[in-house]
Image (spheres, helix red, strand yellow):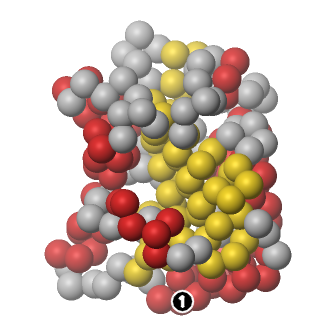
Amino acid sequence: MKKRSDGIYFLTERYAPIEDFLPIDTSRPIELDLGCGDGDFAAQLAARYPERTILAADLLLGRIRKVRNKSEQRNLPNLKPLRAESRLLISRMIPDGMLDRVHLLCPDPWPKDRHSFRRLNSSDIMMHFARILKPGGVFHFSSDDAPYFEFTVRNLEGSGLFAPADKAAIADIADLKSDFERQWIEAGRTVVHTAWRKL
């Protein structure tokens, strides 16, 4: 794990808590945009709330470079680009109860049964989301894929770890769109959002 000179944090498979290589002020609110794509949502969030630390994570280096560029061009020192595999990040790197909100926006639904294990909202993953969120922390999910959305809600309900949150939980960011969401809307699809609060 190291920070390169270009400002991108690279997470390898060697276990280490995130604070060992990325100093984070835990007295400030901390949010994670998981699978952040080109970072449009994360950058908007960081600009709106400079008092919060926004972690923007994606596996693809080209995307993370775009996040880094947005951070530098818009002067967003609170936006932290992480190149990381999502499951590794949430299961091994982030300490218990560190995050105030997790945003998982328009992830790949992996619709074929043989690919279902790749879905980030499988029942075993709910445990990791609950672990890294603070008590009362919010899990924010969106999708344009109705079966995947229903699959996620079933797993949230069945986990016993979350309860539906009221609209206020994400009302402050209702106007912010990820690059993926804008693409789907332009293609005529409907993107549905839901928020759940850790019990």
- Which residue is found at the position 35% from the left and 47% from the top? 45
Q: Answer with the quarter of the image where residue 81 lies.
A: top left
Q: Answer with the quarter of the image where residue 70 lies.
A: top left
Residue 166 x, y percent position in the rendering: 53, 76
Check disc 1 and report its element: helix, strand or loop: helix
**Vertical position of residue 25 compared to residue 188: above or below:** above
- Which residue is found at the position 41% from the left and 81% from the top? 192
Residue annotated with mark 1: 147
16 horizontally vs 10: left or right: right
Q: Amino acid at mark 1?
A: Pro
Q: Nearer the viewer, residue 197 or 189?
A: 197
- Which residue is found at the position 78% from the left and 42% from the top? 96
State which quarter of the image contains the N terminus: top right
Q: Is residue 190 visible?
A: yes
- Which residue is found at the position 40% from the left and 19% from the top? 7
Query: How many residues crowd mark 1 within 10 Å: few (<14), some (14–19), many (20+)?
Result: few
Q: Nearer the viewer, residue 174 or 27?
A: 27
